[in-house]
Image: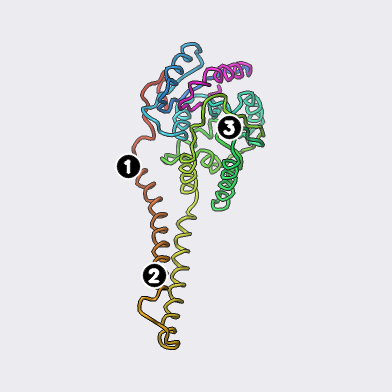
Amino acid sequence: MISVVLPIYNEEKGLPSFVDDLYNQMKNINQKFEIILVNDGSTDQSLQLIQSLCANYSELKFIGLSRNFGHQIAVSAGIDYASGDQVILMDADGQDPPELIPDLVHKMNEGYDVVYAKRIKRANESFMKKWTASIFYKILNKITSIEIPVDTGDFRIINRKVVNALKQMPEKQRYLRGQIAWLGFKQTPIEYERKGRNAGETNYTYKKMIGLAFDAITSFSNWPLRLATISGFVCAILGFILILYTLYAKFILKIYEPGWPSLMISIVFLGGIQLLGIGMIGEYIARINDNVKKRPLYLVDDTNIDIHA
C-alpha cells in the first residue's frame, strides 16, 4: 500500500490536470494506493474541487484543515492520516513530476528507508531564489550536527518505520526534511530536473521562506545562542580595552574631554549587541512557549478518512 500526500493551498487552476497525471502514474505501478489531498485553508475553490475529484476516484481522500496552518504542518497532517506502508510526499503545483514516482518506489524496494529527490536543475526560478537557497543550505549544514541534503525539498518516499518515528516528534515548528535527516536510517537520493509550476503563481513567498529558514536553524542548531555568547564575550573585551584607553587618555595624554564621541559609539555598539543577543534568545523562548502550550498541531474541519492516527 502506497500513500501519496499532497498539501494544497490555492491550487485550483492546475490541480485537476496534476491529479489526473498522478493518478495514472500510480495506476501503472500496479500496487494498491491512496492519494491524500490536504487542503490547507485555501481561499479559492480548491476545497470544492478536491471534494469533486474525490467523488470521481475512490483512491482519493481529502483532509480539510480549519485554517491555513502552513505547508509543513499540512504535510504532517497527511502523514498522520496515511495508512500506506510507504508514503510519498510531494507538492501539487506540478514542480514535482509524478513520472519520477516509479523510480522512487523501485529505489526504495532495494532496501532503503528514505529515498529523496535531489534537484539538478530548477526551471523558472529566479537567480535570487536559487542563490539564497544555496547559501541557506550551506550555512545550515555548517552550524548543525546533522547533514541535511542540499538541493532537496520534501519530494521523497518514506517507509512506515520513518512515518512512525516522525509521529514521535511533536514540535510545532516543523522542518520535515531536517527531521527526516535527523532520524538517520538508510537514505539515498535520486536526481531529477525540477519543472516550473503548471499553473498560477507560487504561494511560497520570501516571507514564508525566511520563516522556514528560522524554523530550520532554531530546530537543529544552538549556534545563534552561542553567537550571542561569543558576541557578549568579545564586547566585554573591547569594553575593557576602551576603559584602559580612556584612563590612559585622561591621565597620560591629557586629551580627555567630557562628551567624548567614543562614549556614544561604545554605548550604541554594546546596546546593539545586547539587543541582538536578547532577540536570539527571544526566538528560542517563543518556540519553547509554543510547544509548552500543547495546542494541537492542526485542526481538521472535514475529511472522508476514518480517524486512525
The image's mark for residue 264 is: 2
Residue at left 34%, top 40%? 294
Q: Residue furthest bottom?
A: 252
Q: Considering depth in this image, is 257 or 162 the residue closer to the camera? A: 257
Which structural element holds mark 2? helix
**Mark 2 or mark 1: which comes first in sequence?**
2
116 sits to left or right of 255: right
Which structural element holds mark 1? loop
Which structural element holds mark 3? strand
Check whether the beta carbons of the residues at disc 3 and disc 1 lie within 8 A of each other.
no
279 sits to left or right of 179: left
Q: Is residue 9 magenta?
A: yes
Tell me if mark 3 has few (under 14), some (14-19) or many (20+) residues whose alpha carbon lies within 10 angstroms of its own. Answer: many
Residue 198, x across and y down, in percent: 57, 24
**Mark 2 or mark 3: which comes first in sequence?**
3
Residue 38, x across and y down, in percent: 45, 25
Cα distance, mark 3 to mark 1? Answer: 31 Å
Check whether the beta carbons of the residues at disc 2 and disc 1 lie within 8 A of each other.
no
Q: Amino acid at mark 3?
A: Arg
Location of the N terminus by quadrant is: top right
| For discs 2 and 1, the disc positioned in front in the rendered view | 2
Q: Considering depth in this image, is 46 or 205 the residue closer to the camera? A: 205
| For discs 2 and 3, the disc positioned in front in the rendered view | 2
Residue span colored magenta: 1-28
Cα distance, mark 2 to mark 3? Answer: 54 Å
Name the residue tied to disc 3. 156
Q: Amino acid at mark 2?
A: Met
Residue at left 51%, top 13%? 57
Q: Quadrant of residue 102?
A: top right
201 sits to left or right of 117: left
Name the residue tied to disc 1. 293
Cα distance, mark 2 to mark 1? Answer: 42 Å
